[in-house]
Image: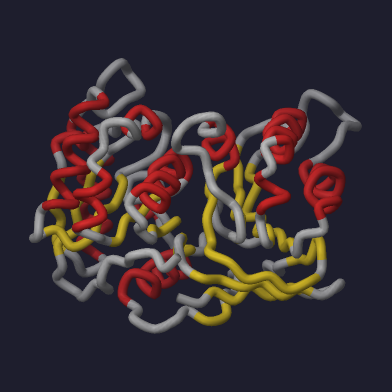
């Protein structure tokens, strides 16, 4: 299946800024708007960016879903950036108009809690999406590498080719081999939270990308085990492991660390697997297109990830 892609952006295009998950303060919002404008784009600020609901949400679910539908339908808006993550995106999944979104494919950018929307848009609207930095949580203080990686995906109309980590950060091989498939996935907590729902991730024949932040290894063990029991690791053609920020064990001094879990839970499936791809909750950070054909080739002592649209 070939996923629809929003057209490549050009300088001066209008970006829709929306908050499908958590809220921000007004000062942070202004900084986020400036950060997008500094990249060379105009900004249409959604009402959710000004909202706070229950302390941790940027408005009621219906308001946030309506705004997303409206931004996809609005012909003046050429791409949609999620203001930040946090929590709240799964609340919108049953409220979105996936047929409307499929009729108006646009570049859609975010990560972390936005994983729920990535998966839903790919599987319900056949839309390729972008796992990339968000204005309020990332672009305000983004380094040149992060901004360049984002713009290359947003404005490029050619295959990305070889993906390179920031300097001094190597991509490592966990399981050697070659695999090709559509890249999908996102934040591990969100991927597992959708299991058993109509929006659970389909990994059959795909490359599964996973990353996480702030979780103890025993919790990561539980989530990876759940993915394994659900058949999602067995179905995947290959696995791409991003960053696992602040996931060191504090509760168990001599306990398993995250890389131990990769060896114990992921490696036995024998799927070509790479790790330390610098995408996720990290700085600098790679932007990765989801819903596009990708390939990974790994040997025992070196790894390559080659993304092709």
Residue 28 position by quadrant: top left
Image coords of residue 132 (percent x, y): 43, 57
Taking 64 as reference, is 207 left or right?
A: right
Q: How many numbered marks does the figure carry?
A: 0
Q: Residue at x 25, y 71 (%)?
A: 7
Q: What scheme was used to colour the molecule?
A: secondary structure
Q: Residue at x 67, y 37 (%)?
A: 230
Image coords of residue 262 (percent x, y): 79, 48
- Rendered view: 15 above or below 213: below
Q: Nearer the viewer, residue 53 or 116?
A: 116
Image coords of residue 285 (percent x, y): 51, 60
- Rendered view: 184 above or below 197: below
Q: Residue at x 56, y 33 (%)?
A: 195
Q: Nearer the viewer, residue 7 or 98?
A: 98
For the question of whether residue 10 can be seen, the reply is yes
Taking 233 as reference, is 256 left or right?
A: right
Residue furthest to the front in view is 1
Residue furthest to the right in view is 254
Q: Residue at x 51, y 33 (%)?
A: 194
- Rendered view: 118 above or below 20: below
Quadrant into which the N terminus falls: bottom left
For the question of whether residue 281 can be seen, the reply is no
Residue furthest to the top in view is 54
Image coords of residue 35 (percent x, y): 27, 57
């Amino acid at each position: 299946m070939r996923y629809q892609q929003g057209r490549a952006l050009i300088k001066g295009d209008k970006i829709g800024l929306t908050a499908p998950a958590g809220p921000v303060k007004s000062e942070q919002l202004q900084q986020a708007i400036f950060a997008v404008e500094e990249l060379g784009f105009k900004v249409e600020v959604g009402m959710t960016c000004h909202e706070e609901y229950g302390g941790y949400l940027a408005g009621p679910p219906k308001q946030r879903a309506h705004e997303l539908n409206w931004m996809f339908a609005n012909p003046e808006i050429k791409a949609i950036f999620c203001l930040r993550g946090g929590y709240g995106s799964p609340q919108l999944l049953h409220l979105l108009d996936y047929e409307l979104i499929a009729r108006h494919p646009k570049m859609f950018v975010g990560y972390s809690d936005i994983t729920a929307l990535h998966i839903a848009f790919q599987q319900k609207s056949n839309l390729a999406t972008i796992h990339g930095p968000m204005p309020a949580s990332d672009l305000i203080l983004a380094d040149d590498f992060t901004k360049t990686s984002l713009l290359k995906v947003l404005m490029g109309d050619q295959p990305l080719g070889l993906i390179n980590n920031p300097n001094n950060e190597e991509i490592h091989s966990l399981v050697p081999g070659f695999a090709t498939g559509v890249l999908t996935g996102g934040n591990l907590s969100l991927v597992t939270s959708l299991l058993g729902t109509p929006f659970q991730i389909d990994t059959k024949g795909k490359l599964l990308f996973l990353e996480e932040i702030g979780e103890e290894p025993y919790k990561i063990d539980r989530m990876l085990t759940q993915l394994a029991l659900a058949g999602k690791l067995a179905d995947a053609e290959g696995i791409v492991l991003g960053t696992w920020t602040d996931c060191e064990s504090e509760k168990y001094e001599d306990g398993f660390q995250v890389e131990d879990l990769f060896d114990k839970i992921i490696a036995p499936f024998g799927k070509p697997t790479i790790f330390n791809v610098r995408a996720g909750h990290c700085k600098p950070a790679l932007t990765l297109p989801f819903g596009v054909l990708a390939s990974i080739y790994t040997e025992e002592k070196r790894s390559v990830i080659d993304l092709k649209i």
